[in-house]
Amino acid sequence: MSDIDVLVRRTIATVNVIARRATRFATRLLIGVTIVCVGGFLLGVAALSDGIEQVWIVSSVVFGSMAIGGAFLARWRLGSVKRHVPELADEVRALIKDGKGPSPTFIETFAVDADGDGDADDLADGSAIVLSRQMYGFRNVAGTGYQRSARMNAAVRAITGFPLLAVSAVAISAVFAFLSFFFLIALALS
């Protein structure tokens, strides 16, 4: 096996490990956000009355859609990384063979193989956080030097954009959960 094939295999394995872990978390996030937002919406409709009920319906649909949509978008983007592994491998191979421009940065980004066995098991030691930071820094490079690498750009965007989508979904869901507590009290008192 050539050095290029080893680098490609290691890079794809690393991206797959990160995408698989993030996809698992995104799936759980989507389920949790959906339950909290729909439950909060239903509790609000049951607890409120008159004109404020209409305001609650409109605002909760808007913000609930943002939270659920953000979690769904994160899950869908991360899932697309796993669906397009062959194209991603071809792009990585072409980038490494090209050797011009930002390719050394690309190779260094995925150089997390501490034990030299060519797989991505080193991410289990907590280096996924370090790699995510490196990929976030790599995001600026990917936009400038890899115009021919649509799948790689999409993978980097999916992995680096996931935290923002997750935080926004969790923040909106926290507001729904907080308000649900008061809706439960109002229902209990009525």
Image: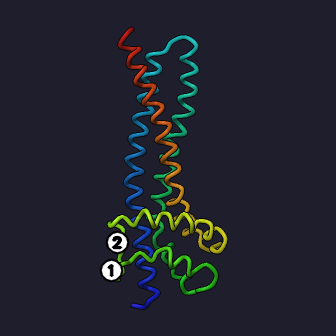
Instruction: Please state which of residues 151 and 182 is positioned toward the viewer in this rendering.
Output: 182
* Identity, as a three-letter code, of the amino acid under mark 1: Asp
On screen, 129 above or below 116? Answer: above
Which of these two is toward me, 54 or 21?
21
Instruction: Determine contact: label 2, label 1, CB under 8 Å.
Output: yes
What residue is disc 1 on? 115
Element on which disc 1 rests: loop
- Residue corresponding to mark 2: 122
- Secondary structure under badge 2? helix
Dot 1: few (<14), some (14–19), or many (≥20) neighbours within 10 Å? few
* Closer to us: 103 or 43: 103
In this view, 179 is above or below 116: above
Name, please, the residue furthest toward the bottom: 2
Image coordinates of residue 144 in percent, x first then y, are 67, 71
Distance, label 2 to label 1, CA atoms, is: 8 Å
Residue density around tag 2, few if under 14, some if 14–19, many if 20 or more, within 10 Å? some
- Name which residue lies at 42% across and 30% down: 177
- Image position, residue 6 (x, y; %): 41, 84
- What residue is drawn where x is 48% and y is 15%? 48
Q: Earlier in the sequence, mark 2 or mark 1?
A: 1
Q: Is residue 177 left or right of residue 124?
A: right
Q: x%, y% of residue 130? A: 45, 66
The quarter of the picture where the C terminus appears is top left
